[in-house]
Amino acid sequence: MRATLLALALLLLPGAAGAEDLVAGLSQDQIQITSNYTGSDLVVFGAIEQPPDIEEDTPPGQRDVVVVVRGPAATMDVRRKDRIAGIWINNREVTLEGMPAYYYVASTRPLDKIAPPYMLARYQIGFDHVKPQSTSTRKAARAEEFRQAVVRERARAGLFSEAPDGVEFLGYSLFRVHVPVPAGAPRGQYTAEVYLFRDGVVMSAQSTPLFVDQTGLERNLFNFAHNEPVGYGLAAVLMAVLLGYLSSLLFRQQT
Amino acid sequence: MEIYLPIAEMSVHWLIILAMGGAVGFLSGMFGVGGGFLLTPLLIFYGVPSEVAVATTASHITASSMAGALAHWKRRAVDFTMAGVLLCGGLVGTSFGVWLLKLLREAGQSELVVSGGYVILLGTVGGLMLKESLEAVRATRSGNPLPSRPAQHHNWIHGLPLKMRFRQSRLYISVIPPLALGFAVGILSAIMGVGGGFILVPAMIYLLRMPTGVVMGTSFVQILCVTAATTVLQAASNYNVDILLAAVLILGGVVGAQFGVRIGAQLRGEQLRLLLAILVLAVGARLLIDLVVTPADIFSVTVEGQ
């Protein structure tokens, strides 16, 4: 839903005549996370096409490129522990719906120098502006407190990250970004968005989908556990019984 | 080599897991206990979600009690009638426990109940063992060993109805105490990931007054069946059995147990019990500290249906 809205928003951008145009692409549109995967890089690259009426010597400081990669939306139960009778106990719970399970933002400069907060909020750029679609609480302050907890937790797991100087320019118009994809990256549809800012205003933007899938033994076991839970349980028992039996055979031979 | 545990959802080094299984296997071989009550907390300390630790340990105990059950079966030291009655209670208990764990997880309290339950369990068992073994050590030092308790021929158990004959144990007692015992141990198996031998064995000897010869074998058979059932039920309703984690733990445990048995045979009984008591209390204390100390982040996040 939000992806569609965002795509619409991108279509309705001020296509001012003579504006610089943006072309971007991805190194892969499918990432397979396998068992002995320790994380890899997705490369987002692109170029700013220059219309002929802009002079070559426009200082590069005025324009900025921001790359955002969003993971699939997830429903998250966030709980706050409180000290009750000396023991830390999960107390209040807030459910956030439609939070991206993965979020990465890279830019040419720190985001607060690129654009004013309302502009960043409009495109959900930056940790302060990644918002859930809905929350189970009506109090804005509480929703914000729990949203920030998600950002912290995801950042610790390497699933949310900000790289204020992550956009690398190769020459005047060519740029590239290395997007880290850790082993715990959730599977699903991601979007890579590239924004071109000039003087704090989005001049051009592009959104490209990509898919992250988990394969290998571990994923097959996970699928087995969730699709055939009883069979999986029986397999676990069979394995345990067999290993126990084998060990008793081995043990008897040794003594 | 790092392996990714599909259910625990974490990357671990397989050697660490193997060593953990080995250490617990060693201790269980040395002390003649199942080791579930040490393995579950150890996995929790390592960062495995408590529910996954509990359910996966159940399958680990299935493997370790398999070997024990086979050995006693060969010596015909198993009272299958008693094991059957215990198992009836055990299956009801574990189903109830697995259901309870599901409710607790949905309420976000499974972690607290598992840790809190362990603090109480390890504190009580460790405390009693420490007291008993210290007395035994003191008695041996002073030269007059403790008098063995005179066997009572009748206790309150004999007043209960629904009596049944247990040939192998040469008992004619009510089925209510073994059913209740099985039920209690079944709940423990589901919620704490323990086999429950440390409760079953003393209860069979002192409460049911079974002959010591068949106690170990019967408890092994009961634990084998209950933990097997627990594994299937946990997998079916809570999706929290990590088969990869279990496999590596079992491999380590099997090897560790062999060394443990050999070392254990060279140590004196009361010293062994004293060591075990201290270990049990230390694990319980560590769990208590984790509950009391301010956590690094008081918020926790669970992603639904990932």
Image (cartoon, rainbow, N blue to C red):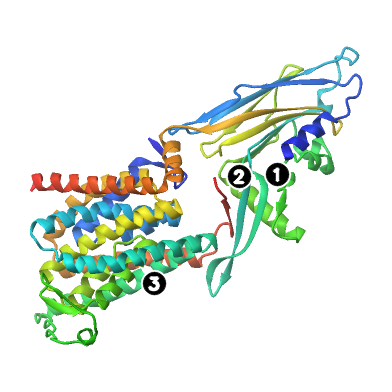
**What kind of element bears circle 3?**
helix
> What is the crowding at mark 1: few (fewer than 14 residues within 10 Å), some, or many (at least 20)?
some
- Residue B237 screen position, x and y as percent: 44, 55
User: Residue tagged by mark 2?
Assistant: A155
Specify the amino acid type for callout 2: Ala
The three-letter code of the residue at mark 3 reads: Ile
Spatial distance from mark 1 to mark 3, Cα to Cα?
A: 42 Å
Determine the secondary structure under disc 1. helix
Amino acid identity at mark 1:
Phe
From this view, report whether residue B97 is shown above or below residue A107: below
Q: Where does the C terminus of chain B fall, quadrant-wise? A: top right
Marker count (numbered): 3
Residue at the location (57% across, 46% down)? Answer: A156
| The image quarter in which residue A95 lies | bottom right
Which numbered circle lies on residue A127? 1
Residue B138 seen anywhere in this rendered image of the structure: no
**Marks 1 and 2 in Cβ contact (< 8 Å):** yes
Separation (CA) of disc 3 from disc 2: 35 Å
Residue A54: assigned label: none
Where residue A5 sits: x, y (%)?
Answer: 78, 37
Which residue was labeled with disc 3?
Answer: B120
Residue A216 lies in what quarter of the image?
Answer: top left
